[in-house]
Amino acid sequence: MLAKVLQSIDARRERALGELAELLAIPSVSTSPAHADDVRQCAVHLAGVLGAIGLSASVRETAGHPIVLASTSRRENRPTILFYAHYDVQPPDPLELWRTPPFEATVAKDENGFDAIFARGAIDDKGQLWCHVEAIRAWQDAGGMPVNLVVVLEGEEEIGSPSLEVFVRENRDSLRADLCVISDTGLFARGVPAITYSLRGLVYEEVFLTGPSHDLHSGGYGGAVPNPANVLCELLATLHDADGRVNIPGFYDEVTALTADEKVMWAKLPFDERHFFDELKLSSGFGEKGFTTLERLWARPTCDINGITAGYQGHGAKTVIGAKASAKVSMRLVPNQDPMKIQRAFRAALAERCPRNVKIEFANHGLSPAAIVPIDTPATKLAGEALKVGFGKEPAFIRSGGSIPVVGLMKKELGIDTLLVGFGLPDDRVHSPNEKMDLECFYAGTRTAAALYEKLALLK
């Protein structure tokens, strides 16, 4: 049966690409209230597509953006797979850096001469989502899915999934499954398919400083009053020591070292450090002393400033001491680190270092633990076989520096592990201008998804 399904997928390549382009044209930017209607339109569109291919599909309301829930009928003596993806996307800014309009999907050559589809959301996550839609369509056309299937498509992943936990908790019975599958990761490199077995967690904080009661003339007051912009820079500069370690008391208390087996496995990966930095137009890297680049990316926690706002930023000069300053800071966590403990430690450290004549306040924009899953399970073995069908090669086992909070949520609320089988490439410019999905990966990913559902039908 799989041969028939794959034949159907191959015959629909051009049509599948066109329908993906239609999905990419919907500017479902979840962080912007101006795009709330677009986010809803995207949910309605996807529910319609899933309903048209024979699934029971509906748009479910949440406190925020809607969630699409779809499923096949449940049959006895077959495993149930929960497929999760997100349909919301990051803002496209800065628009002037896009080679083509971000919401007009365009097929063109990438910098390396490979065909790709360019658009916001192309790889994160609409393109990978569509691989599964096409696979499900092909199975339905061939007589039906080989597994019981539940589909959850979220509209708030890019803003920290604030409504998802409540939705999962309230819909446990409908979401009951043996395994969760997510395609929001990628290959290790072109021609090297991969299964991701660990993700870093996240603590995302915003820091607000307030000095004088109002903006002041820098000539009339400079040197005599605290300048929140100066203080903010001083505080942020304390977050790392000279060796690149995060300078927050207790930050590394629960961090565990890599196993010997992992070090051997990673050493075999075709990682060219010089090429890695050349592609970024960097002469060298940066990071915690004593660790390799891959270890810094996958197995060490981080602290990064994601944005700074202070003073006058308009055209020309304005001699002013701004009354307020703020910064957004994200910390990526590794397994065993407690996000709430790290949040408390971060706030305590900055509050202690802040001068008493400047007010400091905090807001949180995301808390999620790191995730790690075993790599020697039957599901992982079956996923490896599916990747070989799609990409023609055995997969590598890798970690990811990114975060997918739903992995921990599925374990906590539903008691199930997650299989991370993604189809992106490292140079797909996730969250950046000129985001793309390689067409070879799109087609191979669709074949992989189809094979994966057949393989997972063997789970007992």
Image: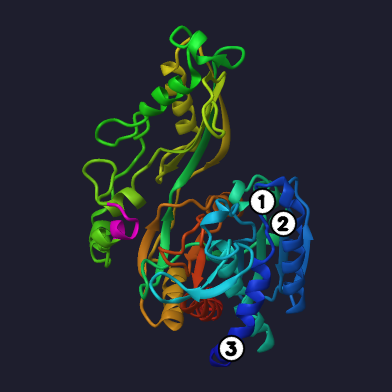
Q: Are marks 2 and 3 in contact (CB under 8 Å)?
A: no
In this view, the mark in front (1 or 3): 1
The correct choice, above or below, for 131 with respect to 222 in the image is below
| Residue 7 appears left or right of 253 | right
| Residue 216 appears left or right of 268 | right
Specify the amino acid type for callout 2.
Val
Q: What percent of the width, then of the height, locates residue 122? A: 56, 66
Specify the amino acid type for callout 3.
Val
Provide the residue span drawn in magenta: 276-282
**Secondary structure beneath disc 3?**
helix
Q: Is residue 181 magenta?
A: no
Q: Kindly give the residue lying farthest to the top in the view shown.
A: 224
Q: Which residue is mark 2?
A: 39
Q: CA distance from mark 1 to mark 3?
A: 34 Å
Q: Which residue is mark 3?
A: 5
Q: Residues within 10 Å of mark 2 (few under 14, many from 20)?
A: many
Dot 2 or dot 1: first in sequence order is 1
The correct choice, above or below, for 132 with respect to 353 in the image is below
What residue appears at the point 55 percent right and 61 percent down from the top-left corner? 124
Residue 148 can be seen in this image:
no
Q: What percent of the width, then of the height, locates residue 20? A: 63, 73
Q: Nearer the viewer, residue 421 or 31?
A: 31
Q: Are marks 2 and 1 in contact (CB under 8 Å)?
A: yes
What residue appears at the point 50 percent right and 9 percent down from the top-left corner? 221
**Secondary structure beneath disc 2?**
helix
| Residue 307 appears left or right of 177 | left
Dot 1 or dot 3: first in sequence order is 3
Q: What percent of the width, then of the height, locates residue 291? A: 24, 47
Q: CA distance from mark 2 to mark 3?
A: 31 Å
Q: Which residue is mark 1?
A: 30
